[in-house]
Image: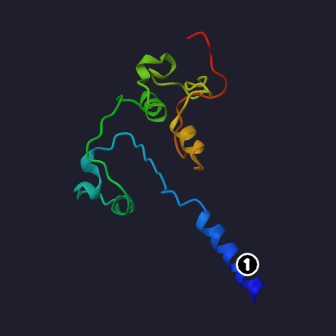
Amino acid sequence: MRIAFVAMLMISSVLSAAEPLRPNVVVILADDIGYGDLGCYGATKIKTPNLDKLAAQGMRFTDAHSPASVCTPTRYALLTGQYAFRHKPASGILSGVAPLAIPADRVTMASLLKKNGYATGVVGKWHLGLGEIETDY
């Protein structure tokens, strides 16, 4: 009986010392969607039930600004926190075979999240170059 009690105490202390659950972080970057295009913001012409459900269960932002009007600089700015037009490879739209626009050692949203215990991933259009970085921009 004492062994079971001690085992339960040990398990209890391990569980209570476990890290608290972190909230999920989902960033949806969509080209050409405006504030009034989703039902959660009042749109009625096109139904967006899945996005509306995400919005209802999470956090919504009502004051947003885009760092650029095209994809590459917008993605670069979102991931790095830097204004893309000050970093030549990311200041225009990159081709599908362009070299990397973000140096591998640059701090990004993903590297900060990973450093804090998150698993990260991306789904969709990358458009920030592939392969090695060219050094002669």
Task: Specify few, some or many for label 1: CA neighbours under 10 Å numbering under 14, 14-19, or 20 or more.
Answer: few
Q: Is residue 38 left or right of residue 23?
A: left
Tag 1's secondary structure?
Answer: helix
**Image quadrant where residue 52 sits:** bottom left
Q: Residue at x 35, y 58 (%)?
A: 55
The image's colour scheme reads: rainbow
| Residue 9 place in picture, x, y as percent | 67, 76
Q: Residue at x 41, y 31 (%)?
A: 74
Total marks placed: 1
Q: Residue furthest bottom?
A: 1
**Image quadrant where residue 67 sits:** top left
- Residue 70 vertical position relative to residue 21 in the rendered view, above or below: above
| Residue 46 place in picture, x, y as percent | 29, 57
- Residue 112 vertical position relative to residue 102 in the rendered view, above or below: below
- Residue 96 vertical position relative to residue 23 in the rendered view, above or below: above
Check disc 1 and give the amino acid type. Ala
Q: Residue furthest top?
A: 136
Given residues 16 and 52, the one toward you in this image is: 16
Q: Residue at x 70, y 73 (%)?
A: 10
| Residue 77 place in picture, x, y as percent | 43, 30
| Residue 63 place in picture, x, y as percent | 26, 42
Q: Is residue 104 left or right of residue 113?
A: right
Quadrant of the frame with the N terminus: bottom right
Q: Is residue 93 left or right of residue 7?
A: left
Task: Give the labeled residue for mark 1.
Answer: 7
Given residues 81 and 133, the one toward you in this image is: 81
Quadrant of the frame with the C terminus: top right
Q: Residue furthest right?
A: 3
